[in-house]
Image (spheres, rainbow, N blue to C red):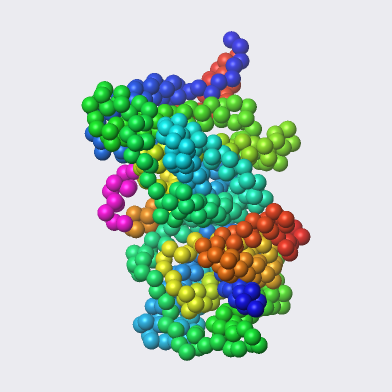
């Protein structure tokens, strides 16, 4: 019975990793940009929510709602004025610029908020649990998983049902031809990053509610997100969710055997998938 | 007068002479410099070696790795392993450090080469994390808290006694001098070796793959093989440097030996600021890096923030780095690798 419980906790943890990964997946899918600062941006989002909660005395959920438009603008500006300038055939500039950004951001957070670990204030809701048959499920993990599914459904709707989504897909396929049809790739990219930052804010909310965070944990979140994306197959959002679940289950199973093996088990699951299916479980036809 | 192909330029000949003088000075340094200077120079030289190998990977091979700490840490732990468990002398153990990094590099490359472009970067990082977590389980070498080199091993190292008597130093200072000389040898061998590699047929093939993989393949270059050669060479060199760095420190822990900031972030910043894809770039970069570190040493995380921002600005404004700017303005190449046709009916040999 304990194993069933472990696996279910792992699946729910996978929802958090899928939230980490969706933003990364979105940005990569549209502009082939791997943002190495993604993990640090999630941590920054968590601090932004924390500041809003502390200053305005809001509940974390409400604070996240206010943080979302702020983060959208930040992402839009970052993409439009910085990252767009690095895009091109050469993979070096975007990698090195986002890596520089990651280190700068990490240390800026360290300087502003110190290395002490923080946590968003918890309420009755965050510690509550529901009994489902023999296993008890935390409300928070359930909410996280539900939000992950909601984000993925929303993104899919956006991609395949709206004009903006059509512009996203067109720019992703061929920016030059898309610009002939009156689409401005630079603005499309900026909007995409803005949306990715909104997802980052949602991820940051659950990161901060579920566990302690400090300025140094960004890179590890980037790695989990990246593993989820690769396992799922580049460009597939449902694949990303499955990837997150696989990492989550591997980690909780590893931890159940020996606490020191938690992270290692996740990495091994990733390497195993890479060995068997190098292009992930649901690869897109091209690229 | 017949046609001939040459890579030398007047500047490179002058640089060669200046280089010989500089090298003689560096060799003689321990005879007149204090222990602090020797330690600073050791740091500069080992960072230069790491930077040159990362530059070979990313600048010439197009392989952006964020997992260099895997090879530094593996090398360092291999050194501690053979010294502590087998009683090998630390000096020859440095060679084992290189071999161990090479051994780890084979599965790393096998996995990481399955990932394209940008994802290769994070792939190497994941593998470095795996190696760090595995090493932290190794209880014989102190597990997560790490361990130190045994005192008799550091006291009775090769050459230590003769350095002690020649320079009249105590054991600890003599160890620094020995480490410095070894670092100097390693740095010179690295620069010389990379320069030699780039001037051979392999180097030409490497440049061709970097500039256009498909075109290079069409003229018979085995692009996959070039990637392997570059990756394994760089792992071996990085492992040697890792072994040497921790021989001097004589104290190790998994978090320090596998630190992504110390062994990869700094190295990337050195190369990017100095100029990626040139041999001169990392040399300039390491000097700028050391100057910044001395200036901002008291400001803690501001220092890393400055480095990060500086790297972003350099990448956007001058993607070829400081050396690239200088070289563009003056046409200067201290380590020319471009082949030029001279003699015959070509009146002027330049351009």
Majority secondary structure of the magenta segment? helix
Residue A36 image point, x, y percent: 52, 59
Q: Residue at x 64, y 36 (%)?
A: B226
Residue B243 or B11: which is nearer the viewer?
Answer: B243
Residue B112 image point, x, y percent: 62, 49
Q: Residue at x 60, y 89 (%)?
A: A131
Q: Residue at x 62, y 81 (%)?
A: A146
Residue A6 image point, x, y percent: 61, 74
Please identify the quadrant where the N terminus of chain B is shown: top right
Q: Quadrant of residue B347?
A: top right
Q: Residue at x 39, y 78 (%)?
A: A51
Residue B184 makes an appearance in the image: no
Residue B238 image point, x, y percent: 49, 40
Most extreme residue toward the top, as rendered? B1
Q: Quadrant of residue A23?
A: bottom right
Please identify the quadrant where the C terminus of chain B is shown: top right
Can you say whether A135 is above or below B49 in the image? below
Q: Quadrant of residue A5?
A: bottom right
Residue B161 makes an appearance in the image: yes
| Magenta residues, start to end | B290-300
């Amino acid at each position: 019975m304990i194993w069933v419980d472990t696996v279910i906790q792992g699946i729910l943890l996978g929802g958090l990793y899928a939230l980490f990964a969706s933003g990364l997946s979105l940005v990569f899918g549209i502009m082939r940009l791997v943002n190495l600062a993604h993990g640090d941006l999630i941590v920054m989002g968590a601090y932004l929510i924390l500041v809003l909660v502390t200053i305005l005395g809001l509940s974390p959920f409400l604070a996240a709602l206010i943080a979302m438009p702020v983060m959208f603008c930040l992402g839009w500006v970052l993409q439009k004025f910085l990252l767009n300038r690095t895009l091109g055939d050469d993979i070096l500039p975007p990698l090195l610029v986002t890596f520089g950004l990651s280190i700068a951001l990490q240390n800026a957070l360290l300087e502003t908020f110190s290395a002490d670990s923080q946590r968003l204030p918890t309420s009755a809701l965050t510690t509550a649990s529901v009994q489902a048959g023999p296993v008890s499920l935390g409300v928070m993990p359930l909410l996280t998983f539900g939000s992950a599914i909601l984000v993925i459904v929303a993104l899919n709707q956006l991609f395949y049902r709206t004009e903006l989504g059509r512009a996203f897909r067109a720019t992703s396929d061929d920016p030059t031809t898309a610009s002939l049809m009156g689409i401005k790739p630079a603005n499309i990219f900026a909007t995409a990053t803005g949306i990715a930052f909104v997802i980052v804010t949602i991820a940051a909310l659950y990161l901060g509610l579920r566990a302690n965070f400090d300025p140094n944990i960004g890179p590890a979140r980037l790695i989990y997100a990246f593993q989820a994306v690769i396992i799922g197959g580049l460009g597939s959002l449902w694949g990303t969710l499955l990837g997150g679940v696989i990492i989550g289950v591997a980690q909780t199973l590893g931890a159940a055997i020996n606490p020191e093996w938690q992270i290692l088990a996740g990495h091994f699951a990733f390497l195993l998938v890479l060995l068997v299916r190098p292009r992930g479980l649901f690869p897109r036809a091209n690229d | 007068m017949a046609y001939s192909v040459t890579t030398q330029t007047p500047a490179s000949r002058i640089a060669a002479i200046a280089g010989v003088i500089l090298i003689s000075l560096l060799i003689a340094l321990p005879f007149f410099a204090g222990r602090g200077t020797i330690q600073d120079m050791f740091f500069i030289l080992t960072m230069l070696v790491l930077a040159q190998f990362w530059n070979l990977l990313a600048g010439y091979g197009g392989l952006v790795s964020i997992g260099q700490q895997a090879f530094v840490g593996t090398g360092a732990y291999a050194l501690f392993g053979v010294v502590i468990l087998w009683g090998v002398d630390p000096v020859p153990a440095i060679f084992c450090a290189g071999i161990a990094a090479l051994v780890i590099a084979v599965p790393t490359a096998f996995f990481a080469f399955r990932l394209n472009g940008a994802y290769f970067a994070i792939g190497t990082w994941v593998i470095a994390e795996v190696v760090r977590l595995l090493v932290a389980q190794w209880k014989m070498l102190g597990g997560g808290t790490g361990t130190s080199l045994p005192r008799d091993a550091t006291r009775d190292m090769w050459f230590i006694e003769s350095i002690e008597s020649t320079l009249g130093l105590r054991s600890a200072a003599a160890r620094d001098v020995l480490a410095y000389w070894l670092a100097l040898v390693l740095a010179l061998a690295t620069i010389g070796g990379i320069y030699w590699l780039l001037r051979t047929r392999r180097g030409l093939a490497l440049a061709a793959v970097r500039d256009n993989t498909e075109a290079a393949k069409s003229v018979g270059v085995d692009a996959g093989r070039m990637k392997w050669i570059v990756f394994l060479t760089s792992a071996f060199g990085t492992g040697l440097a890792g072994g040497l760095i921790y021989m001097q420190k004589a104290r190790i822990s998994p978090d320090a030996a596998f630190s992504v900031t110390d062994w990869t972030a700094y190295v990337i910043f050195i190369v990017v600021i100095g100029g990626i894809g040139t041999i001169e770039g990392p040399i300039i970069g390491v000097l700028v890096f050391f100057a910044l570190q001395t200036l901002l040493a008291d400001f803690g995380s501001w220092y890393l923030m400055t480095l990060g921002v500086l790297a972003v600005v350099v990448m956007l404004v001058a993607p070829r780095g400081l050396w690239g700017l200088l070289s563009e303005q003056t046409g200067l190449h201290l380590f020319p690798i471009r082949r030029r046709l001279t003699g015959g009916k070509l009146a002027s040999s330049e351009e």
